[in-house]
Image (cartoon, grey):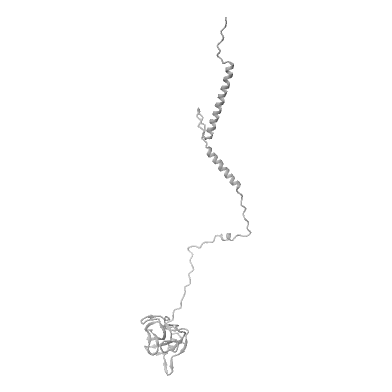
């Protein structure tokens, strides 16, 4: 009786040889795919979180931040390596700028400025020379049979004539008896002064004048042979007295 052949449940050698290469190929493809996935996850900066345990997932690391940090480190190192120390210049003497740079004490605001000396002016005397520096050409007294009632003082025509003392102008203009342009000043003490032969008069009637003030300019108007000032002193109107002693008594020497 022929025995039945047992059921072939196991894989035959030929079949096993065929399936092993197939399983090996699938395993290799899985390894390649897994490696590619890991590389892709690493390039994207994504951390792989493990499952099945309680440990926290690793923190994602940005490759861009790391690359920037490395670039900054390289740039800093390059700058340090390329910089060369500058040797200090040696000068035998200090430069003017260094000397001038030294601090100077600042003036305090509370420092008092030195007071400027005040200009002092001498007070004008009560009586002055009516034409200082003039030459005397004629004094008071008899001349050619008549009384020359004043003193003649000569300087170039146009020389300023000054009031002999303070007072009020009582007459300014052409006077009679050959005096020409004349000015009379009343000094308020019973005396008047008379300035004759002027080329131009600089005051008006009623004007108050001071001693030394310009009242006109020397000329040759009226009966005059040349430019000069005919100066008279009156004790009351038309009562002429010798000007020389009167003016000396008031501190002025007219040269007669």
Name the residue at the bottom extreme.
Answer: 145
Residue 103 appears at what percent x and percent y? 55, 60
At x 55%, y 26%, the residue is 29
At x 54%, y 30%, the residue is 36
Nearer to the camera, 222 or 66: 222
Residue 164 appears at what percent x and percent y? 42, 83
- Image check: 29 left or right of 226? right
Which quadrant of the rendered structure holds the N terminus?
A: top right
Nearer to the camera, 100 or 182: 182
Q: In the displayed structure, would residue 122 be above or below residue 137? A: above
Q: How many discs mark residues in the rendered view?
A: 0
Q: Is residue 36 shown to the viewer in this render?
A: yes
At x 53%, y 39%, the residue is 64
Nearer to the camera, 41 or 184: 41
| Res 127 quadrant in image | bottom left
Q: Is residue 255 shown to the viewer in this render?
A: no
Q: In the displayed structure, would residue 26 be above or below residue 150? A: above
Residue 198 appears at what percent x and percent y? 42, 85
Name the residue at the top extreme.
Answer: 1
Residue 151 appears at what percent x and percent y? 44, 88
Nearer to the camera, 62 or 10: 10
Q: In the displayed structure, would residue 8 be above or below residue 165? A: above
| Res 33 quadrant in image | top right
């Amino acid at each position: 009786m022929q025995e039945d052949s047992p059921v072939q449940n196991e894989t035959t050698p030929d079949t096993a040889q065929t399936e092993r290469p197939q399983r090996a190929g699938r395993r290799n493809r899985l390894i390649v795919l897994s490696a590619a996935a890991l590389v892709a996850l690493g390039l994207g900066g994504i951390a792989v979180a493990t499952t099945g345990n309680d440990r926290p997932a690793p923190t994602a690391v940005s490759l861009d931040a790391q690359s920037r940090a490395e670039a900054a480190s390289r740039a800093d190192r390059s700058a340090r390596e390329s910089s060369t120390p500058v040797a200090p210049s040696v000068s035998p003497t200090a430069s003017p700028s260094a000397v001038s740079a030294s601090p100077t004490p600042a003036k305090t605001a509370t420092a008092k400025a030195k007071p400027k000396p005040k200009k002092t002016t001498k007070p004008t005397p009560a009586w002055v020379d009516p034409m200082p520096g003039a030459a005397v050409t004629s004094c008071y007294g008899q001349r050619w049979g008549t009384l020359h009632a004043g003193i003649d003082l000569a300087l170039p025509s146009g020389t300023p004539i000054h009031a002999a003392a303070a007072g009020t102008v009582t007459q300014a203009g052409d006077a009679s008896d050959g005096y020409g342009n004349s000015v009379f000043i009343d000094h308020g003490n019973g005396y008047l002064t008379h300035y004759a032969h002027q080329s131009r008069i600089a005051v008006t009637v009623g004007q108050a004048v001071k001693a030394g003030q310009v009242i006109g300019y020397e000329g040759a108007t009226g009966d005059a042979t040349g430019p000069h000032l005919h100066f008279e002193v009156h004790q009351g109107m038309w009562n002429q007295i010798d000007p020389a002693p009167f003016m000396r008594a008031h501190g002025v020497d007219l040269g007669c």
